[in-house]
């Protein structure tokens, strides 16, 4: 147990909540219900990197919330040369958000590690996701009881990696940066964002990508026990 750390801040999507798995299940349902002649695996293959790129732009205020929702679908359909109207894209975008939270797969070890950490630390969430959607994810996946505070970018008025969202979260948690650590899957938003705001950080590198070695990183959530 790290004796200087009292508060742990988790990212939600791609860190605790398995966004890619839940997303694929949601698209599979939508494509079947709408009888779209699309192979879901082929779509996801295009969608995942496009969605990540769109989120990067959104994090840095280069596109709006609505542009994020539209662009990630439009560009994915275009990449498959699948013709679809803007009206249908908007319908799918809305249905996707409505249905996404009905799937609640978590990363392996998520509940076990939260059970391990909760008696020792105060736990919190910092997410760039949309408030209404993230609240549903947390509640439907039975995660709410683990966290003392939940900070989202809509509440804070800025998105990770902006240091203001970390300041907001620390204030809400009534703790200090010196006693806090951030755990997340995004090197830019979570790790560098936290480090630049004066918090310690652990990179959740479940995809085992090449990453700098000058900070802590784990490939599985249960490896947090080595540090905390």
Image (cartoon, grey):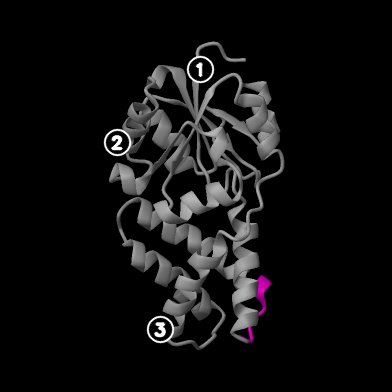
Q: Is residue 130 among what the camera can see?
A: no
Q: Residue at x 56, y 36 (%)?
A: 145
N-terminal of the pair, mark 1 or mark 2, is 1
Q: Where is mark 3, residue-wise?
A: 86
Magenta extent: 36-41
Distance between the alpha carbons at the discs numbered 2 and 3: 35 Å
Instruction: Give the main secondary structure of the magenta stretch.
Output: loop
- Whether the residues at callouts 2 and 3 have beta carbons within 8 Å, the answer is no
Q: Residue at x 49, y 76 (%)?
A: 92
N-terminal of the pair, mark 2 or mark 3, is 3
Above or below, 20 relative to 212: below
Q: Where is mark 2, residue-wise?
A: 164
N-terminal of the pair, mark 1 or mark 3, is 1
Q: Where is mark 1, residue-wise?
A: 5
Distance between the alpha carbons at the discs numbered 1 and 2: 21 Å
- Taking the magenta stretch, the answer to whether it contains residue 38 is yes
- Whether the residues at callouts 1 and 2 have beta carbons within 8 Å, the answer is no
The x and y percentages for residue 190 are: 46, 39
Within-10-Å neighbours for mark 3: few <14, some 14–19, many 20+: few
- Would you say 18 lies left or right of 180 here? right
Distance between the alpha carbons at the discs numbered 1 and 3: 49 Å
- Element class at badge 1: loop
**168 and 136: which one is in front?**
136
The x and y percentages for residue 181 are: 49, 26
Above or below, 154 relative to 41: above
- Would you say 201 lies left or right of 109 here? left
Above or below, 212 relative to 15: above
- Element class at badge 2: helix
């Amino acid at each position: 147990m790290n004796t200087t750390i009292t508060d742990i801040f988790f990212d939600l999507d791609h860190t605790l909540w398995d966004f890619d798995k839940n997303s694929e299940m949601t698209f599979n349902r939508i494509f079947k219900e709408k009888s779209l002649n699309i192979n879901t695996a082929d779509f996801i293959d295009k969608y995942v990197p496009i969605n990540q790129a769109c989120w990067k732009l959104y994090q840095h205020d280069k596109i709006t919330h609505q542009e994020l929702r539209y662009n990630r679908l439009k560009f994915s359909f275009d990449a498959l040369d699948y013709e679809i109207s803007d009206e249908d894209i908007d319908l799918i975008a809305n249905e996707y958000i409505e249905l996404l939270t009905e799937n609640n797969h978590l990363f392996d070890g998520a509940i076990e590690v939260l059970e391990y950490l909760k008696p020792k630390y105060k736990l919190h969430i910092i997410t760039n996701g949309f408030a209404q959607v993230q609240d549903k994810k947390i509640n439907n996946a039975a995660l709410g009881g683990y966290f003392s505070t939940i900070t989202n970018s809509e509440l804070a008025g800025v998105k990770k990696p902006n240091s203001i969202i970390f300041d907001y979260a620390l204030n809400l948690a009534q703790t200090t940066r010196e006693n806090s650590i951030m755990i997340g899957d995004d090197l830019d938003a979570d790790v560098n964002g936290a480090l630049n705001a004066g918090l310690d950080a652990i990179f959740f590198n479940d995809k085992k990508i090449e990453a700098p070695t000058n900070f802590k990183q784990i490939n599985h959530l249960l490896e947090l026990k080595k540090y905390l």
